[in-house]
Amino acid sequence: MSESLVVCEVDGDLVKKLREFRFRKETNNAAIIMKIDKDRQLVILDEEYEASCCESWSFSLTVATFVVYSYKYQHDDGRVSYPLCFIFSSPVGCKPEQQMMYAGSKNKLVQTVELTKVFEIRNTEDLTEEWLREKLGFFR
């Protein structure tokens, strides 16, 4: 039942931006950070970061947040890939109402943008490159 629950829709301009982001040609790390506009019940763009590692923007995740992160991943065998990671940050201490809005909107966003590498984190201090590499290791 929770799979079909949609609390907030995704802004059409954001969907367009995320689809363009998915097929971008740049080889640097980049992130799109999204938030929910509570009044409009809509997932919208909050911030964009270019050429950054996750530690450089994780400080801004003080409230529940969605992140789509294009990460330059160097495999053990030398190959390089650019996985698109979806990170749902719901820090300890978030208001229950906010947590419910984000949790109820997450699946719709993931399905809309067709993401497969989906991670959740509660403590933003744990969001490091090492943590991300460990998570991506399961997708060899």
Image (cartoon, helix red, strand yellow):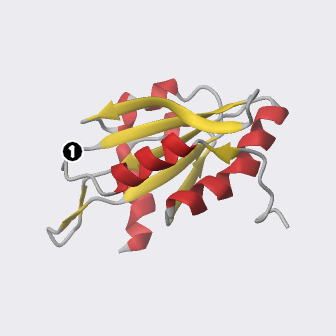
- Report how many numbered discs are placed on residues in the image: 1
Residue furthest front in the image: 12
Q: In x, y percent, where is residue 47?
A: 45, 28
Q: Residue at x 50, y 42 (%)?
A: 14
Relative to 1, residue 90 above or below: above
Residue placed most toward the observer, 29 or 37: 37
Callout 1 secondary element: loop
Q: Can you give x and y, in whole percent of width and height, for residue 84 in the image?
A: 39, 57
| Quadrant position of residue 8 | top right
Within 10 angstroms of label 1, few (less than 14), some, or many (20 or more) residues?
Answer: few
Which residue occupies the extreme left position in the image?
Answer: 78
On the picture, is 134 further left or further right than 4? left
Relative placement, left or right, of 130 versus 126 is left
What amino acid is found at the position of numbered circle 1 in the picture? Asn
Q: Position of residue 16 (x, y in %)?
A: 45, 48
Mark 1, residue position: 28
Q: Where does the image place residue 53, in percent across and percent down from the top left?
A: 31, 38
